[in-house]
Image (spheres, rainbow, N blue to C red):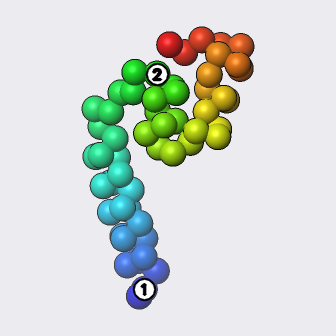
Amino acid sequence: MSSNAVIQRKLEVFDTTLNKLRGYLPVSYEKLCEDWGLQKNCRAFSSDSGRNYD
């Protein structure tokens, strides 16, 4: 596969992902973490960080 084909494929994947994310608005950052399987890292977005995102 040529480098142009690789780049084209990556752009297609990127575009598909962006289209899936359009309109996605989680009710909280905890929900976002849950939806994306980031439970272990969710504390960075929670009130533990000193900011309230809710």
Query: How packed is label 1: few (under 14 Cα within 10 Å), some, or many (20 or more)?
Result: few
Query: How packed is label 2: few (under 14 Cα within 10 Å), some, or many (20 or more)?
Result: few
SS category of the residue bearing label 2? loop
Q: Which residue is mark 2?
A: 28
Vertical comparison of 45 with 3: above or below: above
Nearer the observer, disc 2 or disc 1? 2
Amino acid carrying mark 2 in the image:
Ser
Q: Nearer the viewer, residue 3 or 23?
A: 23
Q: Look at 46% across and 33% down and name the residue there.
A: 32
First in sequence: mark 2 vs mark 1: 1
Q: Which residue is mark 1?
A: 2
Residue 22 spot, x, y in % from top left: 30, 37
Horizontal placement of 23 versus 41: left or right?
A: left
Residue 24 spot, x, y in % from top left: 32, 33
Vertical comparison of 48 with 12: above or below: above
Which quadrant would residue 4 be assigned to in this image? bottom left
State how far apart marks 2 and 1 are (Cα): 42 Å
Residue 29 spot, x, y in % from top left: 51, 26
Q: Nearer the viewer, residue 1 or 39?
A: 39
Disc number placed over residue 48 in the picture, else none: none
Residue 8 spot, x, y in % from top left: 36, 70
Q: Look at 71% across and 13% down and name the residue there.
A: 50
Vertical comparison of 18 with 6: above or below: above
Horizontal placement of 25 versus 53: left or right?
A: left
Name the quarter where the N terminus is drawn: bottom left
Which quadrant would residue 41 be assigned to in this image? top right
SS category of the residue bearing label 1? loop
Q: Look at 46% across and 22% down and name the residue there.
A: 28
Residue occupying the far bottom of the picture? 1
